Image: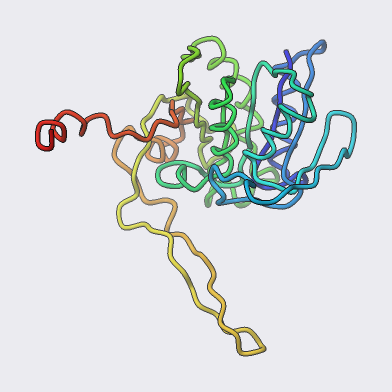
Amino acid sequence: MRILITNDDGINAPGLQVLTEIAHEIAGDSGEVWTVAPAFEQSGVAHCISYTHPMMIARLEPRRYAAEGSPADCVLAGLYDVLEGGRPDLVLSGVNRGNNAAENALYSGTLGGAMEAALQGLPAIALSQFLGPRTADLADPFEAARQHGTAVVRALLDHGHWADEDYRVFYNVNFPPCPGSAVKGMRVAPQGYRKDTFFGVEPHTSPSGRKFLWIRGGPQHLPTLPGTDAAVNLEGYVSITPMRADLTAHDVLAPLRAALE
Protein backbone atom coordinates (compact mmCIF):
# COMPACT_ATOMS: atom_id res chain seq x y z
CA MET A 1 0.00 0.00 0.00
CA ARG A 2 1.19 3.51 -0.85
CA ILE A 3 0.15 6.16 1.68
CA LEU A 4 0.54 9.94 1.46
CA ILE A 5 0.53 11.81 4.79
CA THR A 6 0.28 15.49 5.65
CA ASN A 7 -0.78 17.72 8.53
CA ASP A 8 -1.38 21.36 9.45
CA ASP A 9 0.94 21.64 12.48
CA GLY A 10 4.04 21.53 10.29
CA ILE A 11 6.72 19.12 9.17
CA ASN A 12 8.37 18.97 12.62
CA ALA A 13 5.19 18.50 14.66
CA PRO A 14 5.14 15.55 17.08
CA GLY A 15 1.70 14.52 15.85
CA LEU A 16 3.10 13.97 12.37
CA GLN A 17 5.61 11.52 13.84
CA VAL A 18 2.70 9.63 15.42
CA LEU A 19 0.94 9.57 12.05
CA THR A 20 4.12 8.35 10.37
CA GLU A 21 4.20 5.38 12.75
CA ILE A 22 0.53 4.63 12.09
CA ALA A 23 1.02 4.90 8.33
CA HIS A 24 4.00 2.52 8.34
CA GLU A 25 1.99 -0.05 10.30
CA ILE A 26 -0.86 0.22 7.78
CA ALA A 27 1.40 0.17 4.71
CA GLY A 28 3.37 -2.86 5.90
CA ASP A 29 6.96 -3.81 5.12
CA SER A 30 6.36 -3.80 1.38
CA GLY A 31 4.43 -0.51 1.34
CA GLU A 32 5.44 3.11 0.91
CA VAL A 33 4.81 6.13 3.14
CA TRP A 34 5.30 9.53 1.52
CA THR A 35 5.22 12.74 3.57
CA VAL A 36 4.42 16.18 2.17
CA ALA A 37 3.72 18.57 5.04
CA PRO A 38 3.76 22.34 5.54
CA ALA A 39 7.16 23.86 6.22
CA PHE A 40 5.52 26.03 8.89
CA GLU A 41 2.39 25.69 10.99
CA GLN A 42 -0.83 26.10 9.02
CA SER A 43 -3.46 25.61 11.73
CA GLY A 44 -6.81 27.19 10.98
CA VAL A 45 -6.33 27.51 7.23
CA ALA A 46 -9.19 25.08 6.49
CA HIS A 47 -9.28 24.04 2.81
CA CYS A 48 -7.42 27.04 1.41
CA ILE A 49 -5.02 26.65 -1.52
CA SER A 50 -2.20 28.94 -2.61
CA TYR A 51 -4.01 29.96 -5.77
CA THR A 52 -2.41 33.38 -6.23
CA HIS A 53 1.24 32.71 -5.43
CA PRO A 54 3.73 29.86 -5.85
CA MET A 55 5.06 27.72 -3.04
CA MET A 56 8.57 26.36 -2.52
CA ILE A 57 8.96 22.64 -1.91
CA ALA A 58 12.07 20.95 -0.52
CA ARG A 59 13.11 17.31 -0.26
CA LEU A 60 14.31 16.68 3.30
CA GLU A 61 14.81 12.93 3.14
CA PRO A 62 13.75 10.11 0.84
CA ARG A 63 9.92 10.26 0.60
CA ARG A 64 9.80 13.27 2.96
CA TYR A 65 9.09 16.80 1.70
CA ALA A 66 8.24 20.20 3.16
CA ALA A 67 6.15 22.71 1.20
CA GLU A 68 5.51 26.38 1.94
CA GLY A 69 1.76 25.98 1.67
CA SER A 70 -1.42 24.72 3.24
CA PRO A 71 -2.29 21.05 3.85
CA ALA A 72 -4.47 21.09 0.72
CA ASP A 73 -1.47 22.49 -1.18
CA CYS A 74 0.64 19.66 0.21
CA VAL A 75 -1.80 17.04 -1.07
CA LEU A 76 -1.73 18.65 -4.52
CA ALA A 77 2.07 18.80 -4.40
CA GLY A 78 2.22 15.16 -3.41
CA LEU A 79 -0.09 14.00 -6.17
CA TYR A 80 1.18 16.05 -9.07
CA ASP A 81 4.86 16.67 -8.29
CA VAL A 82 6.35 14.42 -5.63
CA LEU A 83 4.58 11.28 -6.82
CA GLU A 84 4.65 12.50 -10.43
CA GLY A 85 1.02 11.66 -11.01
CA GLY A 86 1.16 8.36 -9.15
CA ARG A 87 -1.91 7.71 -7.04
CA PRO A 88 -1.59 6.79 -3.36
CA ASP A 89 -4.00 4.21 -2.02
CA LEU A 90 -4.76 6.35 1.03
CA VAL A 91 -4.21 9.88 2.32
CA LEU A 92 -3.89 10.47 6.07
CA SER A 93 -3.84 13.95 7.64
CA GLY A 94 -2.76 14.69 11.22
CA VAL A 95 -2.38 13.77 13.96
CA ASN A 96 -3.52 17.27 14.89
CA ARG A 97 -2.53 18.79 18.22
CA GLY A 98 -6.01 19.52 19.59
CA ASN A 99 -9.49 18.44 18.62
CA ASN A 100 -11.17 19.03 15.31
CA ALA A 101 -14.62 18.16 16.59
CA ALA A 102 -17.78 20.27 16.35
CA GLU A 103 -17.30 23.72 14.78
CA ASN A 104 -13.51 23.31 14.84
CA ALA A 105 -13.89 21.03 11.83
CA LEU A 106 -14.84 24.02 9.67
CA TYR A 107 -11.56 25.83 10.37
CA SER A 108 -9.25 22.82 10.38
CA GLY A 109 -6.34 22.58 7.99
CA THR A 110 -6.10 18.92 8.98
CA LEU A 111 -9.54 18.33 7.54
CA GLY A 112 -8.68 20.58 4.60
CA GLY A 113 -5.95 18.15 3.56
CA ALA A 114 -8.30 15.17 3.79
CA MET A 115 -11.03 17.07 1.94
CA GLU A 116 -8.69 17.89 -0.94
CA ALA A 117 -7.71 14.23 -1.20
CA ALA A 118 -11.39 13.25 -1.32
CA LEU A 119 -12.03 15.83 -4.06
CA GLN A 120 -9.16 14.23 -5.96
CA GLY A 121 -11.00 10.91 -5.72
CA LEU A 122 -8.80 9.39 -3.02
CA PRO A 123 -9.68 7.65 0.27
CA ALA A 124 -8.83 10.05 3.08
CA ILE A 125 -8.90 10.18 6.87
CA ALA A 126 -8.15 13.14 9.16
CA LEU A 127 -6.96 12.34 12.69
CA SER A 128 -6.81 14.68 15.69
CA GLN A 129 -5.90 14.32 19.37
CA PHE A 130 -8.28 16.05 21.80
CA LEU A 131 -6.24 17.59 24.64
CA GLY A 132 -7.31 18.41 28.17
CA PRO A 133 -6.52 18.05 31.89
CA ARG A 134 -6.10 14.27 31.59
CA THR A 135 -3.48 14.59 28.85
CA ALA A 136 -1.60 17.58 30.29
CA ASP A 137 0.67 15.53 32.55
CA LEU A 138 1.23 12.61 30.20
CA ALA A 139 4.75 12.06 28.92
CA ASP A 140 3.09 11.62 25.52
CA PRO A 141 -0.07 13.73 25.08
CA PHE A 142 -0.72 11.81 21.83
CA GLU A 143 -0.88 8.53 23.74
CA ALA A 144 -4.49 7.74 22.78
CA ALA A 145 -3.82 8.35 19.09
CA ARG A 146 -0.54 6.44 19.15
CA GLN A 147 -2.06 3.40 20.84
CA HIS A 148 -5.37 3.27 18.96
CA GLY A 149 -4.75 5.03 15.65
CA THR A 150 -3.74 1.96 13.65
CA ALA A 151 -6.79 -0.02 14.75
CA VAL A 152 -9.13 2.86 13.90
CA VAL A 153 -7.66 3.31 10.41
CA ARG A 154 -7.80 -0.43 9.75
CA ALA A 155 -11.42 -0.58 10.90
CA LEU A 156 -12.33 2.26 8.54
CA LEU A 157 -10.47 0.67 5.63
CA ASP A 158 -12.37 -2.57 6.25
CA HIS A 159 -15.82 -1.17 6.98
CA GLY A 160 -15.96 2.46 5.82
CA HIS A 161 -17.94 3.81 2.88
CA TRP A 162 -15.41 4.26 0.08
CA ALA A 163 -17.64 4.58 -2.99
CA ASP A 164 -16.21 6.59 -5.87
CA GLU A 165 -18.79 9.40 -5.82
CA ASP A 166 -18.71 12.99 -7.05
CA TYR A 167 -18.32 14.21 -3.46
CA ARG A 168 -16.84 11.14 -1.90
CA VAL A 169 -16.85 10.54 1.83
CA PHE A 170 -13.81 11.26 3.97
CA TYR A 171 -13.52 10.67 7.70
CA ASN A 172 -12.89 12.92 10.68
CA VAL A 173 -11.40 10.97 13.60
CA ASN A 174 -10.90 12.55 17.04
CA PHE A 175 -9.13 10.68 19.85
CA PRO A 176 -10.41 11.44 23.36
CA PRO A 177 -8.53 13.61 25.90
CA CYS A 178 -7.43 10.76 28.13
CA PRO A 179 -4.61 8.21 28.51
CA GLY A 180 -4.53 5.43 25.96
CA SER A 181 -5.54 2.86 28.57
CA ALA A 182 -8.72 4.84 29.34
CA VAL A 183 -10.06 4.84 25.77
CA LYS A 184 -13.39 3.02 25.81
CA GLY A 185 -13.75 2.27 22.11
CA MET A 186 -15.08 3.86 18.95
CA ARG A 187 -18.32 5.73 18.29
CA VAL A 188 -19.67 6.81 14.92
CA ALA A 189 -20.94 10.32 15.65
CA PRO A 190 -22.29 13.30 13.74
CA GLN A 191 -20.59 16.67 13.96
CA GLY A 192 -21.65 18.50 17.10
CA TYR A 193 -22.06 22.17 17.95
CA ARG A 194 -20.70 23.94 21.00
CA LYS A 195 -23.34 26.50 21.95
CA ASP A 196 -22.04 29.90 23.03
CA THR A 197 -18.50 29.02 21.97
CA PHE A 198 -17.15 31.25 19.21
CA PHE A 199 -13.87 32.42 17.78
CA GLY A 200 -13.15 36.07 18.49
CA VAL A 201 -10.31 38.55 18.72
CA GLU A 202 -8.19 39.85 21.60
CA PRO A 203 -6.48 43.22 21.00
CA HIS A 204 -2.92 43.90 22.14
CA THR A 205 -0.67 46.92 21.78
CA SER A 206 2.94 46.32 20.70
CA PRO A 207 5.92 48.15 22.26
CA SER A 208 5.89 50.41 19.20
CA GLY A 209 2.31 51.45 19.94
CA ARG A 210 0.72 49.53 17.09
CA LYS A 211 -2.46 47.58 17.65
CA PHE A 212 -2.54 43.86 16.89
CA LEU A 213 -5.39 41.36 17.15
CA TRP A 214 -4.97 37.77 18.26
CA ILE A 215 -7.62 35.27 17.21
CA ARG A 216 -8.81 33.30 20.21
CA GLY A 217 -11.20 30.39 20.57
CA GLY A 218 -13.76 29.47 23.17
CA PRO A 219 -13.84 26.69 25.76
CA GLN A 220 -13.19 23.28 24.23
CA HIS A 221 -14.68 21.10 26.94
CA LEU A 222 -18.28 22.29 26.72
CA PRO A 223 -20.51 19.32 25.90
CA THR A 224 -22.19 19.07 22.53
CA LEU A 225 -25.46 17.19 22.11
CA PRO A 226 -25.37 13.58 23.38
CA GLY A 227 -23.97 11.22 20.78
CA THR A 228 -22.18 13.91 18.76
CA ASP A 229 -18.43 14.04 18.22
CA ALA A 230 -17.14 16.22 21.07
CA ALA A 231 -19.62 14.66 23.51
CA VAL A 232 -18.41 11.10 22.91
CA ASN A 233 -14.78 12.31 23.01
CA LEU A 234 -15.33 13.74 26.47
CA GLU A 235 -16.86 10.40 27.49
CA GLY A 236 -13.65 8.62 26.50
CA TYR A 237 -14.49 7.37 23.01
CA VAL A 238 -12.82 7.85 19.66
CA SER A 239 -15.28 9.71 17.44
CA ILE A 240 -15.57 8.82 13.75
CA THR A 241 -17.53 11.26 11.60
CA PRO A 242 -18.16 10.62 7.89
CA MET A 243 -18.07 13.90 5.95
CA ARG A 244 -18.50 15.25 2.43
CA ALA A 245 -17.43 18.51 0.81
CA ASP A 246 -20.97 19.04 -0.53
CA LEU A 247 -22.20 22.11 1.41
CA THR A 248 -25.79 21.93 0.17
CA ALA A 249 -28.47 22.02 2.90
CA HIS A 250 -30.43 19.18 1.29
CA ASP A 251 -33.22 19.30 3.87
CA VAL A 252 -34.03 22.87 2.84
CA LEU A 253 -34.22 22.27 -0.92
CA ALA A 254 -37.81 21.01 -1.13
CA PRO A 255 -39.50 23.68 1.04
CA LEU A 256 -37.45 26.41 -0.63
CA ARG A 257 -38.47 25.19 -4.07
CA ALA A 258 -42.11 25.14 -2.98
CA ALA A 259 -41.86 28.71 -1.75
CA LEU A 260 -39.80 30.24 -4.56
CA GLU A 261 -40.52 28.25 -7.69
Say how many tags the image has: 0
User: Which residue lies at the image location 66% right of the left edge and 88% below the top edge?
Assistant: 207
Outermost residue toward the front in this view: 261
Considering the image in quadrants, where does the C terminus appear?
A: top left
Left or right? Give the position of 260 relative to 97: left
In the displayed structure, 126 sits above or below 29; it is below
Q: Residue 169, percent across and down?
A: 47, 22
Q: Residue 14, percent across and down?
A: 73, 43
Q: Residue 156, percent across and down?
A: 53, 17
User: Which residue lies at the image location 69% right of the left edge and 38% below the top edge?
Assistant: 74
Left or right? Give the position of 109 relative to 29: left
In the displayed structure, 261 sits above or below 177; it is above
Asked which colour scheme the image uses, the reply is: rainbow
Outermost residue toward the right in this view: 61
Q: Residue 168, percent across and down?
A: 47, 21
In the displayed structure, 200 sits above or below 258; it is below
Residue nearer the viewer, 186 or 215: 215
Considering the image in quadrants, where does the N terminus appear?
A: top right
Residue nearer the viewer, 113 or 157: 113
